[in-house]
Image (spheres, rainbow, N blue to C red):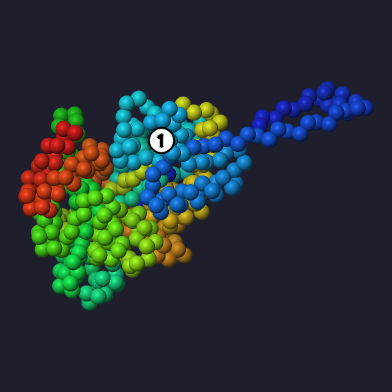
Amino acid sequence: MHSFVSRFGIRRALGFGAVAVLAVASHAVAAAPAKPAEVQQIELFQRLPAEGAASLQALIERFNAQSKEYQVVLSEQDWKSANAPHLMILEGDDEERFLAGKPRFKPLYAVMKETGSALQTLRPPAMMTRTPVDSKGQLLALPIGLSTPVLFLNRDALRRAGMNPETTSVATWFDLQTVLGRLADAGHTCPYTVAEPGRVMVENLSAWHNEPVAAMRGKVSAPSFNGMFQVKHVAMMASWHRARYLQVFERGNEAGQHFASGECAVIAAPSNSWAGFRSKGTIDVGVAQLPYYDDFPGAPQNTLADGPAMWVAAGKKAAEYKGVAKFVSFWLQPENQVVWQRETGYLPLNRAGLLASRSELLGTDLENIKVAVGQLTNKPVTGDSAAQPVVGREKVRRIIDEELSGVWADRKAAKEALDNAVVRAAGS
């Protein structure tokens, strides 16, 4: 991933004369012991998934064990409190509300520069969510939780249906359809499911096929994800749903739970789900790239990276920002990057993390990272395959999912649902 995400006392000296006087004084008074420096607490707010929260806690403990001046502590108070914590890991609606109105954050690049700290990340690429990046490509926040949708497979379920997980292809949607048919014939009641349908079926499948999801209306970018490609894919998914190849679970992480329990055999889900699926230990999990349509010119292109970012609160003291910078620098150290990727499944933040994900020494621990990075950098990003802020908002994703629910219920055709979603998204 050559351009991926980047790229996430004062001492007083005695003068010579004073030294001479003290040297000849017959009753020099011993210097009073230095007063120990007061430890500065750096408060951090987060609502990461279980694996991410546990890994963050371990990271904080390692930082605190080697830091004498600063200690990071978790805070229950978020940015809406009177005294916001120094650091806040935000995503979705909460992040969008935080960024609305007057600036409540201090740009990360400015914090690092003002404290004389290097920001060892890669340059943020065009396929990454634009929220934590300014118009010059500088990081406003550290994108600690990036992921991209990939395909996960229950290898045991494939074996029971008479397929070899090592040689069974799911490279194209038609390959996957064949696999799902064999799973259904073997009695599997949930061959395929998808987490975050709108994010997968509209945002990422469009980028994966270099199809636009936004268009300029005058000088304003507007949603336009109701083209022939998107309608074709949703219509195909509707036929899978009627054939009972596809089940859609609409509450939170319900789809992931059904896959982790072994009920569903294949799932399209964020790449960081790898950590949670493996920690459950109930199924043999494999990971593959999202399928593509091989009859579509130029496919596959690239998918998109999105997820929570760590923001720095505005209005803090210079000494506190120094502590923030030290913690960020610690997080970006190579050994901490490797642990963060392995335990959370999130994408690397710098070159050290990227090189670790390619290392054969880690075996399959970072297989999801390899697949995700392969998707993100499959081909150079284009204007149509880049992240589009007008579509990549939580509210728009909810609108898409709500309209798609009418397709799964057989109340709406694919085109009607997507047309409605575009109209609603434009007015949101």
Mark 1 closeness class: few <14, some 14–19, many ≥20 residues within 10 Å: many
Residue sticking out furthest to the right: 26
Q: Nearer the viewer, residue 64 or 293?
A: 64
- Left or right of 240? Residue 23 is right
According to the picture, the residue beneath numbered tag 1 turns out to be 78
Residue 355 appears anywhere in the view: no
Q: In which quarter of the view is residue 95 placed?
A: top left
Q: In which quarter of the view is residue 398 placed?
A: top left
Residue sticking out furthest to the front: 76
Expressed as whole percent of the image width and height from the top left, the position of residue 2 reads 38, 50
Looking at the rendering, in which quadrant would you find the C terminus?
A: top left
For image coordinates 42% across by 66% down, the residue present is: 363
For image coordinates 21% across by 51% down, the residue present is: 250
Count the marks: 1
- Left or right of 81? Residue 409 is left
Residue 53 appears anywhere in the view: yes
Q: Nearer the viewer, residue 103 or 305?
A: 103
Expressed as whole percent of the image width and height from the top left, the position of residue 349 reads 42, 47
**Of helix, strand and loop, which one carries label 1?**
loop
For image coordinates 59% across by 43% down, the residue present is: 67
Expressed as whole percent of the image width and height from the top left, the position of residue 36 reads 68, 35
For image coordinates 7% across by 53% down, the residue present is: 410
Above or below residue 242? Residue 32 is above
Which residue type carries mark 1? Answer: Asp
- Left or right of 41? Residue 238 is left
Above or below residue 348? Residue 263 is below
- Left or right of 40? Residue 388 is left
Above or below residue 147? Residue 84 is above
Q: In which quarter of the view is residue 400 placed?
A: top left
Q: Nearer the viewer, residue 139 or 59?
A: 59
